[in-house]
Image: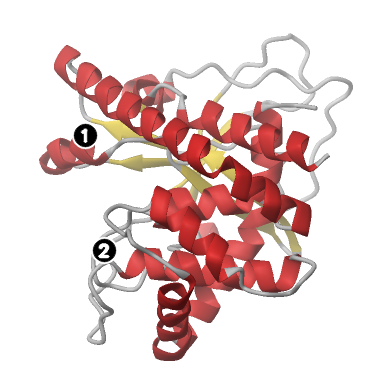
Amino acid sequence: MESEFVDRSIAAVRKWLATPLKSMIRTEEEFRRLSPPPRPKGPVSRPANDSYRITRVLPWHEIPAESRRAFIDALRQPERVVFSFRQGSRQSGPIVLPMTFVVSSPLTNAERAQLRRQQATELEHFDQCITETRGVLLQLAAEGANPLFILSILLSYGSRSGTVFPSSQGAVLRRSQFALETPLAWLKPGAAVEPVRLTGATTSAPPRARRRRGPAGIGPNVGMALLAKHFRGATKRRQPHATEIATLFGVWGRDLRPLNREVVYRRIKRVEEQHAKEFHRLARDEAQQMDADRTFFERLVPS
């Protein structure tokens, strides 16, 4: 049973990582030319006042022209975003959706080739890491850990560089930031309600650097602490499994070898004591995303 769960998790994550990067990048004109979603089956009733019937959500991020080169150089795997939508007292989500990046002009042949090379390297690294750590993943899954969560943390934090404590970023769009755009035509005639495109926009800026920074490469340390917290709550022994974390990050991390349980314990303790508030907030956000991630990946590899 655990073997099947682990293998399905690996297959789902790999299928997501293999999504062509060029398909995640569009011009604004291409984005707006996307065909409308199909008309829902059955009668379409008019929504209550001050509410909307949502048929498709497409999150996108605009890349400024001056940042395009750096963006292409950095993109190595598809990106996903956690989305929630509130209407009055009701909230939809959180759900995980693929992110689309909007650029001013179509990708050049050279940019497409570069993205293919970068993605191929990332997939090769993923396959090698799975080969070396599948046994540990099976052991942890048998103990009760979630292999999808483990893989998500390893991919997000194993190779993260920098000295600023990682944080999840969110944007709340107020009602005044939404606008109704051009009506869309259902693919079937006789619609009871004319569909429209509802758009909301907000701007984001890089987070201000914190005065109290962590050590170089604090990202992997945070990833270790997140896994330890998950293992304490999910596994039968209710322990952090520092030996297994050392094995995982020794393979998935960049330039982290040699690692052992004592080194992992010290790194985890440093994160939990020196960054207690930031870590608590990040752990809460990662835990909330876990169920949404499971739903997202199960669509890729159905039972």
Q: Position of residue 227 (x, y in %)?
A: 56, 65
Q: Position of residue 22 (x, y in %)?
A: 34, 22
Amino acid type at mark 2: Pro
Label ID, residue 32: none
- Give the structural element (helix, strand or loop) at label 2: loop
Count of picture labels: 2
Q: Position of residue 259 (x, y in %)?
A: 39, 65
Q: Nearer the viewer, residue 153 or 97?
A: 153
Color theme of the render = secondary structure
The residue at 48%/84% (across/down) is 272
Quadrant of the image containing the C terminus? top right
* Label 1 or label 2, whichever comes before in sequence order: 1
- Give the structural element (helix, strand or loop) at label 1: helix
Judge from the rendering whether residue 5 lies leftward or rightward of residue 211; answer left or right. Answer: right
Quadrant of the image containing the N terminus? top right
Q: Nearer the viewer, residue 14 or 56?
A: 14
Tell me where residue 68 sits by quadrant: top left
Judge from the rendering whether residue 112 lies leftward or rightward of residue 78; answer left or right. Answer: left
Q: Is residue 93 visible?
A: no
Badge nearest the viewer, 1 or 2: 1
Amino acid type at mark 1: Ile
Q: Which residue is mark 1?
A: 72
Judge from the rendering whether residue 36 lies leftward or rightward of residue 141; answer left or right. Answer: left
| 10 Å crowding of disc 1: few (<14), some (14-19), many (20+) | some
Q: Which residue is the extreme one toward the right? A: 42
Q: Is residue 139 visible?
A: yes
Q: Position of residue 244 (x, y in %)?
A: 56, 61
Q: CA distance from mark 1 to mark 2?
A: 18 Å
Q: Which residue is the extreme one toward the bottom? A: 273
Up/down of 145 relative to 193, above or below: below
Label ID, residue 206: 2
Q: Nearer the viewer, residue 62 or 136?
A: 136
